[in-house]
Amino acid sequence: MVTDVTGQQREGVFAAVAAYVMWGFMPLYLLLLATVSSSEILLHRIIWSVPFGALIIASRHQWP
């Protein structure tokens, strides 16, 4: 039995569990969005991706 778990293995297990949880909640999310138009969803995705992308780039110090 292997008891030495590396940090990379822990990250992999966490990513797998997170993916399964997200896929599990996907049907509920889609039910909530059934009354929202696709153009409104697209607009929100475009608008919200810019500040979150800038935040990620700033936190990683990757500005050119």
Image (cartoon, rainbow, N blue to C red):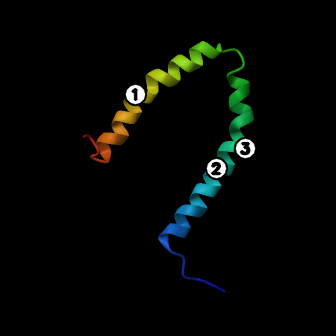
Relative height, residue 12 to residue 53 (above, below): below
**Which label's residue is closer to the chain start, 1 or 3?**
3
| Quarter of the image where the N terminus is located | bottom right
- Answer few, some or many: residues within 10 Å of disc 2's Cα (few below 14, many 20 plus, some between 14 and 19): few
Which residue sits at x=26%, y=40%? 63
Tag 2: residue type? Ala
Tell me the mark number nearer the camera, choosing from 1 and 3.
Answer: 1
Q: Nearer the viewer, residue 49 or 18?
A: 49
Q: Which residue is mark 2?
A: 19
Residue wearing tag 1? 50
Which amino acid is tagged 3? Answer: Gly
Residue ID at (52%, 24%): 45
Labels 2 and 1: the sequence-earlier one: 2
For mark 3, give the secondary structure: helix
**Residue 43's spot in the image, x, y percent?**
52, 17
Secondary structure beneath label 1: helix
